[in-house]
Image (cartoon, grey):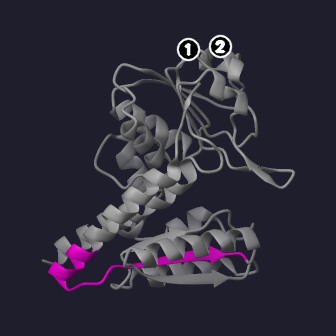
Amino acid sequence: MAIIVNGNTLARVIREESAHEFRALTSNSGVPPGAAIVQITEEASATVYTRHLQRAFTEAGVDVRLHVCPSTTAPDEAAALVRQLSGDSAIHAIQIQTPLPAQVSLESLLEELDPAKDVDGIHPLNAGRLAQGRPSIVPATPLGGLEILLHHRVEIAGARAVVVGRSVEVGRPMASLLLQHDATVTMCHSRTRALDALTREADILAVAAGRPGLVTGAMIRPGAAVIDFGTNVVDGKTVGDVQPDAADRAGLLTPVPGGTGPVTTAMLLRNTLLLFRRAVENRS
């Protein structure tokens, strides 16, 4: 049976450490940390998450501004908001909630986003630095997946890793992180043939395909570390991309919910701390 990761426990430790560092840095610099969350929809599920994130920031001592805009917001209005926040010296981190309404493209908002305030690590400049193996802000979800592997002392160097999913937010940065830690990485996606043959070779399997139950227990190498990034709603329940029978073969497994989700929020705090520290150092 697999070790089932308790993401809430790990996230609590990271959040407490971040809060302590925020207090120390604020005390030494006299500068309060500030963050902004941009949500361009009134959907209840998005609002629940942003309120949760707002509470996490507040508990860590970060002054957070929540900007909730209607889904009918014009593209130029959305871009102007991000431009204004990027130019606000009291804001050190900006988080743009996705998905966005059809008329507002993420690319148009990223053009207005200061890369030095990109807490999600999705600005082309930050994504490029990560791909080149240079110091960068890393998207919180894959960064959380890596943190789980490191926390549980999974041997990454020399391991065969398979990443299922190629999104710029999760799959691609996860592959880059594993490469930087000397894993041999194979990336798979919806067009990959004989997916099961590849996943059965993986010592580390990271799944971010957005397809509920895509990976079955039979597709997993016995003893493998399995990181399930999937967040899918099926019949009113949140389920992952990996089926529950994976626990019978994996050595380590992140459950859904309660696995990578809480750690993602904690890593957003850690990213905010990094951006805040850089801003304070640049003032000196």
Q: Residues within 10 Å of mark 1 (few under 14, many from 20)?
A: some
Instruction: Give the amino acid type for the residue marked by disc 1 in the picture.
Output: Glu
- Check the image and report above or below for 28 versus 240: below
Is-magenta flag for residue 40? yes
Tell me the quadrant of the picture where the N terminus can be found: top right
245 or 132, nearer to the observer: 245
**Is 174 placed left or right of 70 in the picture?**
left
Q: At 41% from the left edge and 52% from the top edge, which residue is drawn?
A: 138
Q: Secondary structure at mark 1?
A: loop
Q: At 54% from the left edge and 70% from the top edge, which residue is drawn?
A: 53
Taking the image as drawn, is residue 107 in sight? yes
Residue 121: horizontal and vertical position, in percent? Answer: 44, 57
User: Mark 2 and mark 1 in contact (Cβ < 8 Å)?
Assistant: yes
**Is 188 placed left or right of 139 in the picture?**
right
Q: Looking at this rendering, what residue extends furthest in the right direction?
A: 235
Residue 186's disc is none
Is-magenta flag for residue 234? no
Residue 170: horizontal and vertical position, in percent? Answer: 54, 46
Taking the image as drawn, is residue 271 in sight? no
Q: At 70% from the left edge and 18% from the top edge, which residue is drawn?
A: 218
Residue 197's disc is 2
Residue 42: horizontal and vertical position, in percent? Answer: 74, 78
The residue stretch that appears in magenta: 23-41
Instruction: Give the amino acid type for the residue marked by disc 2 in the picture.
Output: Ala
Q: Secondary structure at mark 2?
A: helix
Residue 201's disc is 1
110 or 52, nearer to the observer: 52
Q: Residues within 10 Å of mark 2 (few under 14, many from 20)?
A: few
**Is 138 placed left or right of 39 in the picture?**
left
Mark pair 1, 2: CA separation? 7 Å
- Check the image and report above or below for 83 versus 260: below
